[in-house]
Image (tube, rainbow, N blue to C red):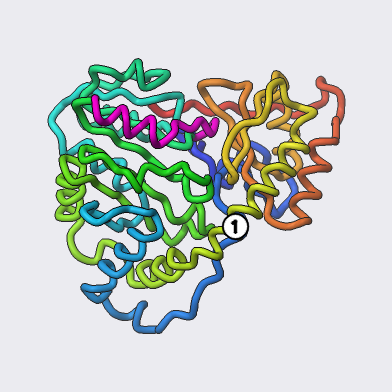
Amino acid sequence: MDGEGIWHGGSLGAARRLFPRAPEPWIDLSTGINPVPYPLPPLSPDLWTRLPEPGAQAALEAVARGAFGAVEGVDVLAAPGTQILIGLLPSLLPPRRVAILGPTYAEHAAAWRAGGHRVTEVADLAAAEGADVVVLVNPNNPDGRLVAPATLHAFAQTHAGLLVVDEAFADLEPGASLCPQLPDDGIVLRSFGKTYGLAGLRLGFALGGAGEGGALVARMRALMGPWAVSGPACAIGAVALADRDWRARAAAARAADAGRLDALLAPHARAPMRGTRLYRLLASEDAPALFARLGRAGIYVRRFGHDPSLLRFGLPAGEEAWARLEAALAFQGPPPHLRHSVRGEKPRH
C-alpha cells in the first residue's frame, strides 16, 4: 500500500507516513509471513563469492518436488520469488480470455491485463466456463476460501484451457494442494518465503503438468536463463524444504496462533473470522477506525481498497507483540472529534 499502485502489505514506510507519531518499533501484521522463521543453516562462504553450481538449482527442484508431493513428469522450476512468475506467464501467450476467481491477490489481474489479455473476475469455477485461462489463489488471499483439489482436478478434465493455481499459502493447510494430481494443462505456483518466514530470500516455484502447463514452465525456465536463483537461496531452500518435521510443527503452532488471534478479534467482528494459518480476515463496520487506532499504536495491518470493512491480520511474533496488539484492541482512545485522521491512498490499477 505504498505510493501509487496496487495496495500491498509490508511497507513500513507507508505506515510511518500515515502515522508519523506512532511508537517504534512498528509491529508489522500487514503480511502473511510466518513470524517464526526457519533457522538458517550454516552456509559456506563460497555461496556468496561464486556463481551457483549448475547442479544446485536442479538439486533444489528435486527436493521441492518431494516437498510439494508432485509426481514424476511434472516440471518443477525454481525462481527468485513467485512474483516474477506471475508477471512472466501472461507474456508467453497470445491474447486470451482470462477468468480470475476474485476478489483475490490483485497482481494476477494486473499481469494478465498488462499482457494484453481480456480479464474477467468471476465468483466461482462455474462462472469461469468458456475462459481460455482460469486463475485462482488457493487458499485465497485474503479470505482463505479453499476450492478442494478434487474439485479443481475434475474441473480441469472438462475445461479446455489452462488452469493456473497460486498456492502461496497452501504449505500449512492440510490437503489443500493440487500438486499431487496436477492436470496436464495446469500450473501451480508455490511460495517459499511465506511458509518459512524468509521472504527476503526471494524464492518461489512453478510446477507444470505434462501438457501445456509443462511447456509454459519450460519456456519460463529458458527466459530466466542460468543463475536465476542465488546460491544461498538454493542451499537454504533445499535444507528447509527437506525438513518435513519442521513444517509439521510450524503448521500446528501457527494453527494455535490463528485461533488465539481469532479470539482477540472476535469482539470486533460482524461475521466469523476467515483466512489461513498465517493470516486472519476481520470483517467489521468499525474497520477504518480500528485501522487508525492500531496505526497510532504502531501496529500496521492490511486494509483493502475494494472493501473498507475488511482488515487482514498477520500473526504477531512473540509475547511482547501479542501484548501490544491486545492492549491496542482494548484501548478505546479519545473521543472521535479529537482523533487524528488517516490520510487516504489511491490504489493502483
Q: Is residue 251 above or below residue 92?
A: below
Residue with the mark numbered 1:
250
Looking at the picture, how far across and down is residue 274, in whole percent? 61, 31
Looking at the picture, how far across and down is residue 180, in whole percent? 35, 48
Residue 155 in magenta stretch: yes
Query: What residue sits 61% from the left and 26% below the top?
Result: 310
The residue carrying pointer 1 sits among few (fewer than 14), some (14 to 19) or many (20 or more) residues within 10 Å by Cα, namely: many
Residue 197 in magenta stretch: no
The image quarter containing residue 159 is top left
Amino acid type at mark 1: Ala
Q: Which residues are magenta?
A: 141-158
Query: What residue sits 37% from the left and 42% below the top?
Result: 178
The image quarter containing residue 320 is bottom right
Q: How many marks?
A: 1
Q: Secondary structure at mark 1?
A: helix
Query: What residue sits 16% from the left and 52% below the top?
Result: 223
Horizontal side of residue 160 vs 34, given as left or right: left
Q: Nearer the viewer, residue 263 or 63?
A: 63
Q: Is residue 35 above or below residue 160?
A: below
Horizontal side of residue 100 vs 342, given as left or right: left
Horizontal side of residue 178 vs 35, given as left or right: left
Looking at the picture, how far across and down is residue 109, in whole percent? 34, 29
Query: What residue sits 47% from the left and 55% below the top?
Result: 193
Looking at the picture, how far across and down is residue 298, in whole percent? 71, 45
Q: Is residue 42 above or below residue 33?
A: below
